[in-house]
Image (cartoon, grey):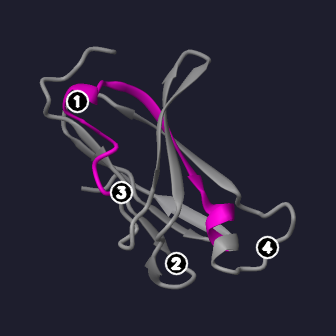
Amino acid sequence: MGQSSSGGGSLTTHVLDTATGKPAAGLSISLYRLSGDSHRKLKTVTTNEDGRCDAPLLEGDAFEAGRYELVFSVGAYFRALGVELPEQPFLDEIPIRFGMADPVHYHVPLLVSPYGYSTYRGS
């Protein structure tokens, strides 16, 4: 664990808004590397018009096996669309923790609405 790959691994995500049936454009996502009790923020990105990031979140020498967390800022996204949410929305920030063991492509998509979400290991 913690060793760099030979450049073969990558991490991507894709967010679909199931309430509108469209890609979630303009949604902020933060990527963290987890180690013990520490969270080290690696980057924050915003989804494009297709609900994707313009580049992989990790790739090449930046890709390392280990534990990671993506935090999707869905409350701010839905408010920006004009969705009326309570002061304390049911879903505000969605953290997804996952492990990457091998230097291959990992895809962690999110399907989201103001009151539910799902994820899976995509391809």
Residue 6, given in percent of the width and then of the height, sits at: 12, 23
Residue occupying the far bottom of the picture: 20
Quadrant in which the N terminus appears: top left
Q: Is residue 35 visible?
A: yes
Q: Label 3: which residue?
A: 53
> Which residue is at 40% across, 55% downward?
120
**Callout 4: 10 Å neighbours few (<14), some, many (20+)?**
some
| Quadrant hosting residue 50 | bottom left
**Callout 3: 10 Å neighbours few (<14), some, many (20+)?**
many
Number of the front mark, 1 or 3: 3
Q: Sequence order check: which comes first, mark 4 or mark 2?
A: 2
Q: Sequence order check: which comes first, mark 2 or mark 3?
A: 2
| Dot 2 and dot 1 residues touching (CB under 8 Å) | no
> Which residue is at 53% across, 62% downward?
27
Q: Sequence order check: which comes first, mark 4 or mark 1?
A: 4
The part of the chain drawn in magenta is 54-78
Kindly identify the amino acid type of the residue bearing the numbered disc 4: Leu
Q: Is residue 114 visible?
A: no
Q: Label 4: which residue?
A: 85
Residue 36, given in percent of the width and then of the height, sits at: 56, 15
Q: CA distance from mark 2 to mark 1?
A: 31 Å
Q: Label 2: which residue?
A: 18
Q: Secondary structure at mark 4?
A: loop
